[in-house]
Image (spheres, grey):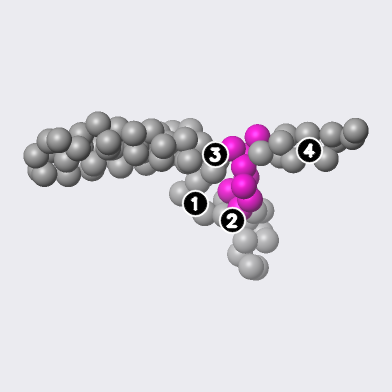
Amino acid sequence: MNYTGLLTCLAALFIIQYDKISIVHIFILMLSVFATYFLTLIKSEFFLNKILKLILILISFGLILWLVFPDFYRGPMAEVNKAIYSIW
């Protein structure tokens, strides 16, 4: 059996790209799973505490994403050459 195509697809996931499925999107999925898990831990608290913890989780989610992949918030055109970007 030839697994070259499968290995190429799996290797492409670990290249940082913002306009295709890559490690960036896997990292966002991982953070979302952690955030969902943490939100399930606070289901028996008061409403205000839930809202405050939700805001804290969302801010930390955005901060971690910005620290690991700072170009994520620039959009899918983050890696495009500046000369081409102005024409586009």
The tag on residue 26 is: 3
Give the crowd class for mark 2: few <14, some 14-19, many >=20 residues within 10 Å.
some
Quadrant of the rendered image containing residue 60: top left
> Magenta span has 34?
no
**Magenta stretch bounds:** 14-23
The residue that disc 4 covers is: 6
The residue that disc 1 covers is: 74
| Mark 2 in CB contact with mark 1 (< 8 angstroms) | yes
Q: Secondary structure at mark 4?
A: helix
Left or right: where 46 falls relative to 35: left
Q: Amino acid at mark 4?
A: Leu
- The residue depicted at 66 percent of the width and 39 percent of the height is 13
Q: Amino acid at mark 2?
A: Met
> Magenta span has 17?
yes
- The residue depicted at 30 percent of the width and 32 percent of the height is 38
**Label 1 to label 3, Cα distance in Å?**
18 Å
The residue that disc 2 covers is: 77
Q: Earlier in the sequence, mark 2 or mark 3?
A: 3
**Label 2 to label 3, Cα distance in Å?**
19 Å
**Label 4 to label 1, Cα distance in Å?**
30 Å
The mark closer to the camera, 1 or 3, is 3
Q: Amino acid at mark 1?
A: Arg
Magenta region, main secondary structure = loop
